[in-house]
Image (spheres, rainbow, N blue to C red):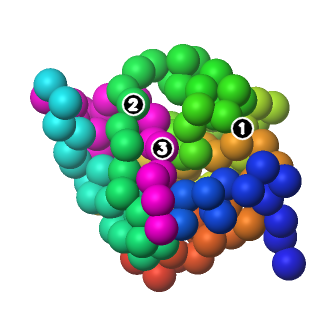
Amino acid sequence: MPADPNGTLDRATGAELRVGASPDASLIEVRGDDVSGVLAEVVEAFAASIDATVEWTVGGEEQLVTGLEEGELDLVVGGITDETPWLDRAGVSRGYPEMPGANGRTIVMLVPLGENRFLSTLETFLDEELG
């Protein structure tokens, strides 16, 4: 059974899922404090599946990956593809080439390194939702 050394899934379940969003015109839109788009909807649905609410942080990928490393974020989404340069700094989900709005890209999501139980739960949800 995968484990989470830092307890990401346990901490977020029934509480708050801290998500970093990197704007991408077709996947993540930011207007003021409002984060929307295909990936935002997927994240909100995942959060609901673990009885959590989403706390959004908007920024560039480097800033958000640093947030993962420092324990400030649980998940990072945006136009991040399976060719991401962040492999040595974050856990990476399986790629989802059929993500609506991906325009032919294979989209991945980032989690803190080593949080395998959280990643497994996320991927199970994504597999069911996105196929």
Q: Which of marks 3 and 1 is nearer the N terminus?
A: 3
Amino acid type for the residue under numbered disc 3: Arg
Query: Residue 8: horizontal and vertical position, in percent?
Result: 67, 54
Q: How many labels does the image show?
A: 3
Amino acid type for the residue under numbered disc 1: Ala
Q: Which of marks 1 and 2 is nearer the N terminus?
A: 2
Query: Residue 114: horizontal and vertical position, in percent?
Result: 82, 49
Q: Please state if 117 lies on the left or on the right of 66 as rendered.
A: right
Magenta-colored span: 14-31
Read off the residue under disc 2.
Answer: 57
In three-dimensional space, the C-alpha distance between marks 1 and 2, rounded to whole angstroms, equals 17 Å
Query: Residue 72: horizontal and vertical position, in percent?
Result: 59, 32
Q: What element carries label 1?
A: loop
Which residue is painted at 85% across and 78% down in the image? 1
In three-dimensional space, the C-alpha distance between marks 3 and 2, rounded to whole angstroms, equals 8 Å
Quarter-of-image position of residue 38: bottom left
Amino acid type for the residue under numbered disc 2: Thr
- Asked if disc 3 and disc 2 are in contact, CB closer than 8 Å, the reply is yes
Read off the residue under disc 1.
Answer: 90
Which of discs 3 and 1 lies nearer the camera? The answer is: 3
Read off the residue under disc 3.
Answer: 18
